[in-house]
């Protein structure tokens, strides 16, 4: 008789590109900071720098298994200090191409 497989981990992969958004709240759910743009470097991801978020969640506890505390991370500190959009300012702007230029 085949052994029944028991689910343990849910892996979620999301491609955000530069549509990522996060809000940071205190223990009273009061807003501290927010950020939108590229996926920040402290978020769990596998490849695809700045575009993907990969979360491995333990089904029993709800814990994110591949989470690392971002306190002390330069990007997280910049977000808390209101400097979170620095990466967007450095990124080259896309250029629209007219049909006759193709």
Image: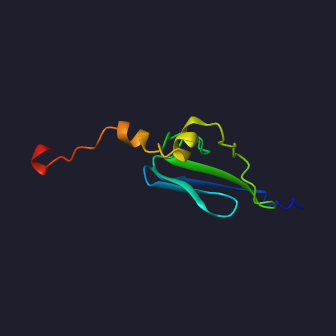
Question: Residue 85: image x %, image y %?
Answer: 43, 44
For the view shown, which residue lies furthest in the right direction? 1
Does residue 62 appear left or right of residue 2 in this picture? Answer: left
Question: Residue 2: image x %, image y %?
Answer: 86, 60
Viewer-closest of 42 and 26: 26
How many numbered discs?
0
Vertically, is 29 above or below 39? below
Does residue 3 appear left or right of residue 63 in this picture? Answer: right
* Among the 4 quarters of the image, the one containing residue 9: bottom right
Residue occupying the point 61% across, 62% down = 30
Question: Residue 101: image x %, image y %?
Answer: 12, 44
Evaluate whether residue 41 shows in this view. Answer: no
Question: Residue 13: image x %, image y %?
Answer: 58, 53
Quarter occupied by the C terminus: top left
Evaluate whether residue 18 shows in this view. Answer: yes
Viewer-closest of 69 and 94: 69
């Amino acid at each position: 008789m085949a052994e029944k497989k028991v689910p343990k981990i849910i892996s979620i992969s999301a491609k955000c590109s530069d549509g990522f958004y996060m809000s940071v709240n205190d223990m009273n759910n009061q807003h501290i900071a927010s950020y939108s743009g590229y996926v920040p470097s402290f978020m769990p991801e596998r490849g695809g720098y700045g575009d993907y978020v990969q979360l491995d969640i333990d089904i029993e506890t709800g814990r994110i298994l591949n989470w690392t505390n971002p306190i002390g991370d330069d990007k997280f500190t910049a977000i808390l200090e209101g400097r979170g959009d620095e990466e967007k300012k450095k990124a080259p702007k896309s250029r629209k191409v007219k049909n006759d230029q193709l």
